[in-house]
Amino acid sequence: MYSVIVVPPSCGDVKDQIRITAGERVAFGRSGSDGGFAVIHAGVARVAGEIVAHRTFWLLSNFSEDQTYVVENPEGAGEHIKVAPGRLEAPVPFEFGRVVLPASGDLLTFDVWAPRHAFRSVPRHGLDGSATVPAFVLDRTKRYFAVLAALCEPRLRGTTSAPLPAVEQLMDRLRPTWPTVSRSAMYWNIDYLSVKLRLRPDRIAAEPGQRVHGKKESLVALALRFDLVREDDLVVLTPLGKVAQ
């Protein structure tokens, strides 16, 4: 099963994402050769670098002779790592990584997701053998969980048939704790959640106009069915120091 997902710059649909498992590699560069993906710009080398999946994180190689690459954590407060020219297999620990390539005055980006991040489970009381693999691993400190909580809120506070919030309503609900929230960030997080929770494509509406709504319905149904979000979790939607009424 894949452990890392690469979202190329031109990715417009889930089928354009590249899924790799531990030990597999994917190159990137201007030519998009050797089974890799293209980052089309005159300032990008034909083969600019390589991504390697390694367990629950990934490695980045910089094949450039003179350009430093940066990997940003989109959810961090400026958190990033630098990968120097010629550096091979630098470990990237972020669950979400945004690779930034400088190219003749431009900054080009693509995303890499590591949705299989593992967390320590409760002690197994001295039992031998391998631990049980959790069905769903969610980090409640991440923004994607706040998006999921906001999606589930109407049905947690109201009825099981309550309509789900539109993207604009989600933005309004999240703005107190996320002032820079945007439509593109909402779509990005909904797409990521559908990968994180392993939604099957046949459970998502195929028509373009219904695709986001289908994803939202599937995400909320799954989250509520398995108690991935409870009413107590709605505290993530409340700014520190304030209590929801």
Image (cartoon, grey):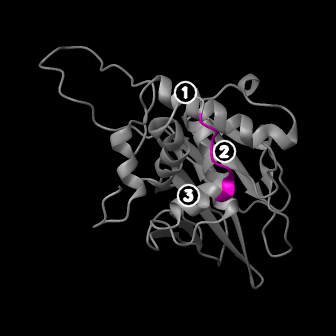
Residue type at tag 1:
Leu
Please tell me whether residue 165 belongs to the stretch shown in magenta: yes
Identify the residue at horizontal 59%, vertical 36% (top origin).
Answer: 162
Q: Earlier in the sequence, mark 2 or mark 1?
A: 2
Q: Where is residue 130, by image quadrant?
A: top left
Residue to which mark 2 is pinned: 191
Do the CB atoms of the residues marked 3 and 2 lie less than 8 Å apart?
no
Q: Earlier in the sequence, mark 3 or mark 2?
A: 3
Identify the residue at horizontal 74%, vertical 27% (top origin).
Answer: 201
Picture disc at residue 222: 1
User: Considering depth in this image, is 106 or 51 the residue closer to the camera?
Assistant: 106
Q: Residues within 10 Å of mark 3 (few under 14, many from 20)?
A: many
| Residue 141 visible within the image | no
Of badges 2 and 1, nearer the viewer stands: 1
Question: Would you place residue 135 above or below residue 236 in this image?
Answer: above
Residue to which mark 3 is pinned: 97
- Secondary structure, mark 3, is strand
Residue 192 relative to residue 106: left or right:
left
Q: Where is residue 136, by image quadrant?
A: top left
Query: Which percent across, then down, holds residue 43?
Result: 80, 76
User: Which range is magenta?
Assistant: 162-168
Query: Which percent across, then down, holds residue 119?
Result: 33, 38
Q: Residues within 10 Å of mark 1 (few under 14, many from 20)?
A: some
User: Considering depth in this image, is 85 or 145 the residue closer to the camera?
Assistant: 145
Residue type at tag 3:
Gly
User: Considering depth in this image, is 55 or 188 the residue closer to the camera?
Assistant: 188
Residue 200 relative to residue 210: left or right:
left
Quadrant, the N terminus: top right
Q: Where is residue 16, by image quadrant?
A: top right
